[in-house]
Image (spheres, helix red, strand yellow):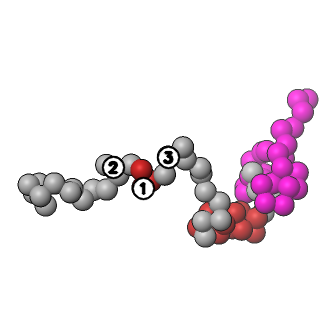
Amino acid sequence: MPDKLTVKCPTCHKIVIWQESSPYRPFCSKRCRLIDLGEWAGEEKRISSQRNISEIDDWSEISDDPNSKK
């Protein structure tokens, strides 16, 4: 029988067996999944970027061109 794949819960670091009977994987529970979601929603967690959004000239959908049609 092959070894079971296990991962650590990203929130509490409890060991989780990666299988269908673990519906919240990689989290150990719904509680840990919601804690993680709340951290992303509250911008406590974020994916870092090489560039600052203010450095990007064309990120806005609004044109600075006075000749452009709205």
Q: Is residue 15 magenta?
A: yes
Which residue is at a point 79% across and 44% down the rendered structure image? 18
User: In the rendered structure, which disc, 3 or 2, sits on the residue that comes first in sequence?
Assistant: 3
Q: Amino acid at mark 2?
A: Asp
Q: Position of residue 70 (x, y in %)?
A: 13, 61
Specify start and end residues of the magenta stretch as a single range: 1-25
Element at label 3: loop
State the residue in front, 57 or 69: 57
Q: Is residue 16 visible?
A: no
Residue 14, image quadrant: bottom right
Q: Is residue 6 magenta?
A: yes
* Distance (Cα) linking label 1 and label 2: 7 Å
* Distance (Cα) linking label 3 and label 1: 8 Å
Could you tell me if the residues under marks 3 and 2 are in contact, i.e. CB atoms within 8 Å?
A: no
Which residue is at a point 61% across and 56% down the rendered structure image? 46
Category of crowding for the residue at label 3, using alpha-carbon neighbours closer than 10 angstroms: few (below 14), some (14–19), many (at least 20): few
Could you tell me if the residues under marks 3 and 1 are in contact, i.e. CB atoms within 8 Å?
A: no
Category of crowding for the residue at label 2, using alpha-carbon neighbours closer than 10 angstroms: few (below 14), some (14–19), many (at least 20): few
Q: Position of residue 13 (x, y in %)?
A: 86, 55
Q: Position of residue 67 (x, y in %)?
A: 8, 54
Could you tell me if the residues under marks 1 and 2 are in contact, i.e. CB atoms within 8 Å?
A: no
Which residue is at a point 88% across and 29% down the rendered structure image? 2
Up-down relation of residue 4 to residue 54 (above or below): above
Q: Which mark is residue 54?
A: 1
* Distance (Cα) linking label 3 and label 2: 11 Å
List the residue tagged with mark 3: 51
Q: Which mark is residue 57?
A: 2
Q: Amino acid at mark 3?
A: Arg
Residue 64, image quadrant: bottom left
